[in-house]
Amino acid sequence: MARIGFVGLGNMGMPMARNLQRAGHAVTGFDISPAAMAAARAAGIPTAASAPA
């Protein structure tokens, strides 16, 4: 499957990133909110240190 960088893990982005991950894609997420980043990691979505990373 595809490697996807997902920017924006808020109310709309997190469910979208999870759906892509469940579909078998390698998803890495980023958000400027530390709480959103922590929620992504708790959901098993790896996070990046910055959007370009």
Image (tube, grey):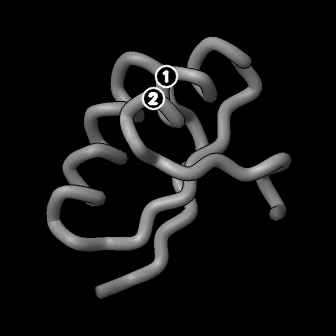
When asked about the image quadrant of residue 26, the answer is bottom left
**Picture disc at residue 4:** none
Residue at the (27%, 33%) spot, across then down: 15
The residue furthest top is 35
Q: Is residue 5 above or below residue 24?
A: above
Secondary structure at badge 1 equals helix
Q: Which residue is mark 2?
A: 42
Residue at the (55%, 58%) spot, across then down: 28
Rendered-image quadrant of the C terminus? bottom right
The picture places residue 42, in percent across and down from the top left corner, at 45, 29
The amino acid type found where label 1 is placed reads Ala
**Label 2 near label 1: C-beta < 8 Å?**
yes
Residue at the (67%, 32%) spot, across then down: 31
The residue furthest left is 23
When asked about the image quadrant of residue 2, the answer is bottom left
Secondary structure at badge 2 equals helix
Q: Is residue 30 above or below residue 31?
A: below
The amino acid type found where label 2 is placed reads Ala
- The answer for how far apart the CA atoms under marks 1 and 2 are is 5 Å
Residue at the (56%, 62%) spot, across then down: 5
Q: Is residue 29 above or below residue 13?
A: below
The picture places residue 21, in percent across and down from the top left corner, at 29, 58
Mark 1 packing: few (<14 Cα in 10 Å), some, or many (20+)? some
Q: Which residue is mark 1?
A: 39
The picture places residue 45, in percent across and down from the top left corner, at 46, 47
Q: Which is in the foreground here, disc 1 or disc 2?
A: 2
